[in-house]
Amino acid sequence: MTTSPYLQRAHKPLKNQLKGKELLDSSSLNKGSAFTKEERESLNLEGLLPPQVRTIEYQLQMEYEHMHQKKDDLEKLIGLLALQDRNETLFYRLVIEHLEETMPLIYTPTVGKLCEKYSHLFRRPRGIWITPDDIDNIPKILSNASEEEIRLIVVTDNERILGLGDLGAGGIGIPCGKISLYCAGSGIPPWATLPISLDVGTNNLDLLDDPFYLGYKQRRLKGKEYQEFIEAFIEAVKEVYPRALLQWEDFKKENAMNLLTRYHRRIPCFNDDIQGTASVAVAGVFSALRKNNTSIKDQRIVFAGAGAAGVGIGDMIKMAMKDENIDPELLDLSVVYVDSNGLIGHGAQRREAYKQKVALSDTAMQHYGFEENRIYSLFEVVEKVQPTILIGTSTIPGLFTEKIIREMAAYTENPIIMPLSNPSSKAECTPAEALRWTEGKATVATGSPFSPVSYDGKVHHIGQGNNVFIFPGVGMGCILSEAMEVPNEFFLTAAYTLAGLVSDEQLAKGSIYPQIDDLRKVSKEITIAIMKKARDMGLGRLLDDEEIEELVTKSIWYPSYQKYV
Ligand code: NAD
């Protein structure tokens, strides 16, 4: 078996054997007060540190205490990033040991606040910025970024940062945060990663007017020039880091879909907002079906919302139905979309081309008794289709009314209700409402976290479809198997694997996702599953199951201090 020694190193190599202050200033090698007496002597550190030698456990306790002394979440994040700049090993240990607590800081929602104020809070750069002026110089910039071989790139053009819109150069906080989750979640070593902001300008007037704004002070590049810039970027990535996996992050919807279509065969890449989201939502559906002891091909699903999220989830559900050899006539009836103009049926006029693709067929319209050229509301669609699963990706709070939910519950014994819109204030209904209006029958999962709900003496845990269960494992699986492309089948495999990791006990409590604290275990299983799938599809390395498991186990990076003498 050829192995992947680069990823199997437990530690970043001591290339130039740094000493003294330089060693303390290297975030990936610094151990702070944990340098031993012998190390201090041989590495010219005598006198540069206070005399007591501490263990990493002691340091962790101290950092955790520091984090808690800060009352404001943004301040906590700033403190954590300072730790990352000072001592990367300690930062990742802290994140891994307190995942549930640190994740909302290093990623959404707190990181969004950092992106908004980026130019005013700027301290040390992390990642790289590439502007239109650099179009002929991108390979050089990529080479400047690292002395190591990069295997994972997360790139944004900053146009649709979380739900916050165009944040210009400050959007870099998102690829940085996401990469931290990759490293903490699946053990991709930080030195093999690179966050990138394609700073193509901004249409955010507040930023353009801000004298402190650090980004490219022009309106956004668009049209042909934008396409040429992206093309130059991709060619440069292929030249400088030919083995890198690339994740598109927070591009606006049309660009996200176009870029994925254009590049998915030219470079191993995927879009987490589209594919990761679909995968985690479908995993939730699989778990809920397991709880109800029924199969995907027996479901009718109504989507309220036909944007990137809804369409991605629906496509993957259809893929799963085909996997179960569903009768094509049933498949045609099984997924129905409603958007802001009502039912998307045969003949419906929609501006977006992708909506035409999800329109209900003429035959299905007749089957359900829908007339062409009439607008049907969500209630009318639920009444006629009688869905077993109702999924909300509309961003409209309160869209799932009592009338709609009661109608659904009237004929479905085990309704599955997923108000996925984020943040929690935008959820189509609250879990408490879904449970009350279905008299406790519903299985509910949301996009944002909600507290457990008590109904009729039973406590229902509410699963949160968080993409972090999916992308670290998929990414690591692609990297280790050196996959040439990242097809949707990988995300379906990840969904099956994730659903299989929810215990019967968790299911009985209504929770259809694992605990966040199990993230490393979940990611490892998904990594293995992706490598097997890549091999079976002829897209990845030809290793047998045992070799795959061995390689994955060896390659997972865990932050601990290396002995330097
Ligand atoms: P989008 O803007 O692309 O799509 C929104 C869709 O909702 C559009 O098709 C729009 O026509 C439709 N819509 C608007 N008003 C409606 C109404 N009254 N009735 C029915 N449909 C209506 O957004 P998106 O990227 O698809 O994301 C949608 C939501 O899903 C967001 O809140 C996002 O946070 C959430 N989401 C959740 C997860 C998750 O749970 N992991 C992942 C991604 C997105």
Image: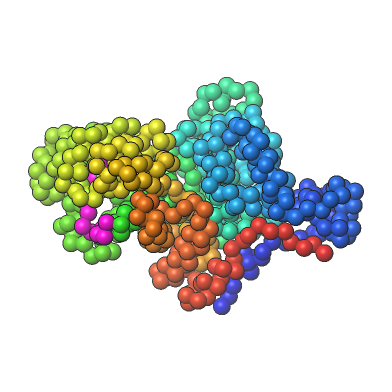
Residue drawn at x 64%, y 49% as measured from the top left: 94
Residue drawn at x 21%, y 62% is 326
Quadrant location of the C terminus in the rendered image:
bottom right
Residue 303 covered by magenta stretch = yes
Task: Please say whether residue 139 is one of the residues in the magenta stretch.
Answer: no
Residue 347 in the figure: left or right of residue 392: left
Where residue 155 sits in the image (x, y, percent)?
53, 46
Q: How many marks?
A: 0
The residue sitting at 64% across, 53% down in the picture is 93
- Locate residue 391, reporting x and y percent: 29, 44
Between residues 246 and 545, which one lies in front from this camera angle?
A: 545
Q: Is residue 333 above or below residue 224?
A: below
Identify the colour scheme used: rainbow
Which span is picked out in magenta? 292-306
| Whether residue 307 is visible | no
> In the rendered view, would you say 317 is above or below 365?
below
Residue 188: give x, y in percent of width and height: 58, 58
| Position in image of residue 184 (x %, y %) | 58, 53
On the picture, is 16 further left or further right than 420? right
- Front-most of residues 144 and 536: 536
On screen, residue 147 versus residue 499, left or right, reads right
Residue at 69%, 48% in the rendered image:
61
Q: Residue furthest front?
A: 457
Q: Is residue 386 visible?
A: yes
